[in-house]
Image (tube, grey):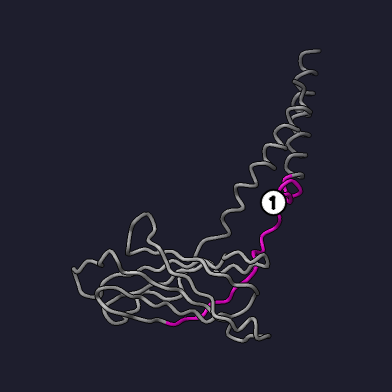
Amino acid sequence: MNVRTRALAVAIAVLIAQRTSLAHSGPPFPIVTDAMRGPYTISIWTDPDATDNRTPAGQFWIVIASSTKGATLPADTRATVSVRPSAPSSPSQAALTSTRTEPVRGDVTNQFGAVLMDHEGPYEVRVDVDGPLGRATIDSRVDATYDLRPAPYMIAWYLFPFVLVGFLWTRLLLRRRTLRRER
């Protein structure tokens, strides 16, 4: 197999591997940290991506603990995440979107839910926690943005100068080796 065929095979493999990296759009960040509401201590982490294709990309992780020291959280405690645009530009955008969260890997203290955020801008976030210990509500705000990372095929464009320098350097080293052997 010659060098060009190998290089082409590696480039195709890198581009195909990029499809798997589309699943993650960045780390979540906290919008509420350890707020005590009723019988619960609540933290909200989010990755608020807006989408145009009607997929629920506004991700929320709700961390819930009992505010009573040493008490465990009952297994049927659940949270509901609701979002509404802060400044709706049309009546359709004023609609409330909500989802019921589910425990992450069976851990009731860490729950996940995804909601549709259909445009960029500020959103009002409301989390309602309900369980045997009682009810609690917490409000916050978040700015949804579209995923601003470059398209995956752009990796080839960004890597091109480095690959070119590597190719030229390797060619120079091989030429030097050939010249030494000829002496």
Looking at the image, how many numbered discs can be counted on the residues? 1
Mark 1: amino acid:
Pro
- The residue wearing badge 1 is 152
30 to the left or right of 136: right
| Residue at image point 25% right, 73% down | 132
72 to the left or right of 85: left
Question: What percent of the width, then of the height, locates residue 55?
Answer: 60, 64
Under circle 1, the secondary element is loop
Q: Which residues are magenta?
A: 139-159
User: Front-most of 55 and 31?
Assistant: 55
137 to the left or right of 59: left
Question: What percent of the width, then of the height, locates residue 130?
Answer: 33, 75
User: Front-most of 68 and 162?
Assistant: 68
Based on the displayed image, in which of its 4 quarters is residue 104 positioned? bottom left
Q: Is residue 143 magenta?
A: yes
Residue 183 visible (yes or no):
no
